[in-house]
Amino acid sequence: MTRAESFQRLLRRFVRGLLIVGVALLLALGALWATLRIALMPAAGDWATEIGRGPLTLRASVPQLVWLATTPSIGPLLHGLRVHSPMGPVTLGWIAAGQEGPEPVLTLHCEPCTLPLPAAVGQHRLAVPAVQLALSRHEVQHLRGTLLLGAHDPQGDDAVITARWQARRQGAGWNVRLQGPDAPARHWLALLAPGLPELAVARIDGRIGADAELRLPARTLQVTPRVQGLAVSGLGTERWAHARSSCGPHRVHDARGWLARAVLAAEDQRFFEHPGYDLAELLAALDANQQHAAIRRGGSTITQQVAKLMVAGDERTLARKLRELLYAVEIEQTLGKARILQLYLNLAPWGEDAQGRLLCGADAAARHYFDVPARRLSPRQAVTLAAMLRNPQREAARWAQEGSVDRDRLAWIAQQVRGVPVRQRRGLVAQLQAESSPQAVTSVPADRTAMIVDGL
């Protein structure tokens, strides 16, 4: 056998061996891939996500991923790993048992980070400068750890808030309970709205804390907030007392009249009790919006609505709501309740006229819809204007088509009005209820109906 033939035979054996090794490796990788798919396969209705890229994309159970990642035999292999996620680049770390506690800890660091939000908040995601999550196993199907949120405060040191959390497996997902500390209000604002321009100029005192319960993957959220001594200054709202707008000349409205009282009944029944924001109403709005997975209820006080009309605008974002909150807290101190109510009655929108021009201010609305100045509105007319404030465009369109607005809402508002003659209020409620329910007309005696109409 020649030297060339020996070399060729050796080469064939090498290639054959290489092919065998390659096939064996492919089979092993295929078996590993199949095992991984089976191990991570989500059950029906399970919380799932996609990992990998291209043909290696794998749909996996999130609870199972978390469970495997916190396993002492796997966790150390993840240390230093950097992965791309919908939230941003995430760097994983591993702290062995005994270094910081009796249990090993998996850390996830994201900077910057984009966090998903429930639909009820009004925006889908929140950009946070830095997030670090530490988690460890505690019991079977039980995780716990800390959440660090970091941001830059334009007027001071970087804001860092550390919250403790624990999560239990519940059905196809997790039930997460979070205990947020009482921290300076400025720090919370810097975290939730890093680009808020007011942070650079306003003095913001007080502390805010919150406990929360989050259900994943449904992303339903329950919050128990705590606010202590919140005060704002430096925004210049004292000038609003003399502000002028395109709504026309400001009128002085009777704060004890039917219009002002009907507006309070419709929009802000605790107006004279709250400090510019109403936590109970905000939480009720969050709950209602979560039930519909969309914004159906605002929760803003009249003070917040004035801030919205003056500076915050209509954008449905968390940053806009926080701007609105800051201005509302300040104008409670700089203007007071009486001036705030007058501003609202002079600026509030009431739909559009036939030419498509915005109708704003109670006097313009009264002249447009009833051809009288606001001071001469009847109780029923005042309640009608108050009812339109919930959705001015929609109610203006209903008025154009039907000559009225939602009669059930009219009756409800009339029932809530306080500080007016009881007999007059009851008469108006009876009339409105009779109009909204045809069956009720026969239950109102003719002489009583005449008395009602005369009393209005």
Image (spheres, rainbow, N blue to C red):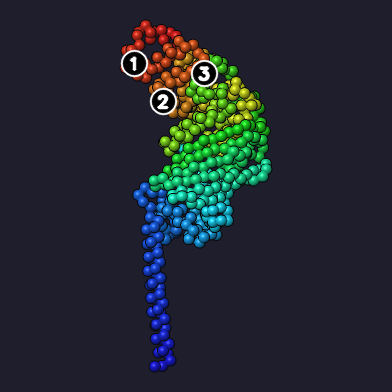
Q: Give the class, few, some or many, for how many residues have Cα within 10 Å of label 3's Cα (few <14, many ≥20).
A: many
Please name the residue that numbered disc 2 is placed on.
398
Mark 1 vs 2, N-terminal side: 2
Give the quarter of the image for residue 239: top right
Query: In the picture shown, does residue 236 fall above or below 98?
Result: above
Secondary structure beneath label 3: helix
User: In the image, what residue type sits under mark 3?
Assistant: Arg
Q: CA distance from mark 1 to mark 3?
A: 27 Å
User: In the image, what residue type sits under mark 2?
Assistant: Arg
Residue at left offset 41%, top offset 89% = 6
Q: Give the class, few, some or many, for how many residues have Cα within 10 Å of label 1's Cα (few <14, many ≥20).
A: few
Q: Horizontal and vertical percent for residue 90?
A: 53, 54
Mark 3 vs 2, N-terminal side: 3
Q: Is residue 112 visible?
A: no
User: In the image, what residue type sits under mark 1?
Assistant: Ala
Mark 1 vs 3, N-terminal side: 3
Residue at left offset 45%, top offset 20% = 413
Please name the residue that numbered disc 1 is placed on.
440
Residue at left offset 55%, top offset 47% = 147
Which disc number belongs to residue 261? 3
